[in-house]
């Protein structure tokens, strides 16, 4: 059992399972969250708050959220646009 747990933690890395990210919503706005790879976090675009992902586990306690600057949200939006345009 311990080996399985260690393997699962190693495989989890910092990412969030796709199915899990589809289910999770912002604890404040109840809107969908967007996954950000760097730094690992879940972002609520509706209210401009970022929730950290620690050891593959989303920290969705409202006090863990970080209010994003408008520059931060612009960087994330531009990066998302670039990745779509490059495909």
Image: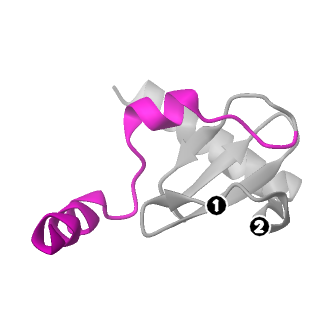
Discs 1, 2 touching: Cβ within 8 Å: yes
Which quarter of the figure is the N terminus placed in? bottom left
Q: Position of residue 7 (x, y in %)?
A: 15, 66
Determine the image quadrant of residue 3: bottom left
State the residue at coordinates (42%, 48%). Answer: 16
Of 39 and 57, the residue lying toward us: 57
Indicate the position of residue 54 as horizontal and vertical percent values.
51, 69
Verify whether residue 12 appears in magenta: yes
Identity of the residue drawn at 61% across and 35% down: 24
The residues bearing labels 1 and 2 have C-alpha atoms spaced at a distance of 7 Å
Q: Position of residue 43 (x, y in %)?
A: 68, 46
| Residue, disc 1 | 59
| Residue name at image x 73 percent, y 55 percent | 50
- Does the stretch in magenta take in 61? no
For residue 63, which quarter of the picture? bottom right
Q: Is residue 29 above or below residue 57?
A: above
Q: Is residue 69 left or right of residue 82?
A: right
- Residue tagged 2: 64
In the foreground, 67 or 28: 28
74 vs 35, left or right, is right
What secondary structure do most residues of the magenta stretch adopt? helix
Please name whichever residue, 23 or 38, is drawn nearer the observer in this view of the structure. Answer: 23
Mark 2: few, some, or many residues within 10 Å (few <14, many ≥20)? few
Q: Secondary structure at mark 1?
A: loop
The disc label shown at residue 2, or none:
none
Give the farthest residue toward the front: 1
Identify the magenta region. Answer: 1-28
- Left or right of 78: which side holds 19? left
Residue plotted at (39% across, 34% down): 18
Q: Is residue 58 above or below residue 86?
A: below
Q: Is residue 21 above or below residue 64?
A: above
Is disc 1 surrounded by few (<14), some (14 to 19) or many (20+) residues within 10 Å?
some
């Amino acid at each position: 059992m311990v080996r399985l747990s260690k393997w699962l933690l190693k495989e989890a890395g910092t990412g969030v399972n796709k199915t899990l990210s589809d289910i999770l919503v912002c604890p404040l706005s109840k809107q969908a969250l967007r996954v950000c790879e760097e730094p690992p976090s879940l972002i609520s675009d509706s209210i401009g708050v970022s929730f950290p992902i620690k050891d593959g586990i989303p920290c969705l306690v409202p006090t863990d959220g970080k209010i994003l600057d408008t520059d931060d949200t612009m960087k994330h939006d531009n990066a998302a646009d670039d990745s779509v345009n490059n495909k």
